[in-house]
Amino acid sequence: MEYIRRLFAQNRDIVADICKHDPEFFAKRANKQEPHFLFIGCADSRVPIETLTGVAPGEMFVHRNIANQVRSVDLNLLSVLQYAVEVLDVEHVIVCGHYGCGGVKAAMGDQSYGLVDHWLAGIRDTCARHEMELARLGDDKRRFERMVDLNVLRQVHNLTRTPIVQSAWKRGRRPMLHGIVYDIHDGLLKELVMQVDGNDRARELLTTQRDSVGG
């Protein structure tokens, strides 16, 4: 119970500090949310995105799963995406991976993990697609980090193919899709692909991925 009690104690301290500077902080945000971002990230506890980016409550709509996957059969993800795009009208959808991702590492190996193997199948497919490029990198650390990057790029591309995003783009050039990576070793975010806001940019993204493995 020690850890649970600590959560409540820290909550009270944080709320008291916020209200000291702005007594109406929570009341102003209680009636509605108007987020600028949908963040799709990994469930890893080392990626505290709100803390790292400094966003305030109400600014970021969040979905997390193992290895930040965007899958056409994931009704949870698709429901979040639809609500964010069609109801909240978010301007930006961010896919954020992170170096040291356990899901990506597991997908790169041969060990079976039972049920989670089904979830990792898409990452394993990406590994196979980029086998030649990864082999040229020479050491395991660089291959691991490159696979984290490639996984993010693949998930951004998967977003572009969802009917939700396609329908939104027919109405205008939002949401803009972005792929970034968080480095758990220094706390910094790295840009991979930014401002994918239509099918032309989506095709450029796919071409870039194909060219990186020679076709």
Image (cartoon, rainbow, N blue to C red):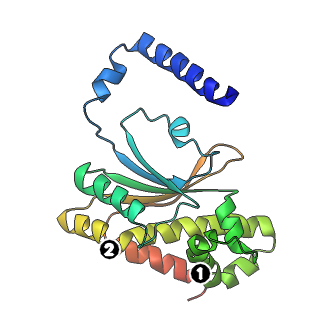
Which residue does the image show at 60% across and 46% down from the upper left? 47
Query: Real-space Cα distance between discs 1 and 2?
Result: 23 Å
Compared across the picture, whether 164 is left or right of 7 comes to left
Q: Position of residue 16 (x, y in %)?
A: 48, 14
Q: Can residue 195 be seen here?
A: no
Which residue does the image show at 65% across and 50% down from the upper left? 183
Quadrant holding the N terminus: top right
Q: Position of residue 135 (x, y in %)?
A: 75, 80
Which residue does the image show at 56% across and 38% down from the upper left? 52
Quadrant holding the C terminus: bottom right
Q: Can residue 83 be seen here?
A: yes
Q: Position of residue 34 (x, y in %)?
A: 28, 40
Q: Given the current orientation, which residue lies at the most extreme top position?
A: 20
Q: Given the current orientation, which residue lies at the most extreme right position?
A: 139
- Depicted 160 relative to depicted 26: above or below: below
Q: Residues within 10 Å of mark 1 (few under 14, many from 20)?
A: some
Q: What amino acid type should be assigned to the residue bearing mark 2?
A: Asn
Q: Secondary structure under badge 1?
A: helix
Q: Given the current orientation, which residue lies at the most extreme front position?
A: 1
Residue corresponding to mark 2: 199
Q: What amino acid type should be assigned to the residue bearing mark 1?
A: Asp
- Depicted 75 relative to depicted 99: above or below: below
Q: Position of residue 22 (x, y in %)?
A: 38, 15
Which residue does the image show at 24% across and 64% down from the upper left? 168
Q: Given the current orientation, which residue lies at the most extreme bottom position?
A: 215
Residue corresponding to mark 1: 125
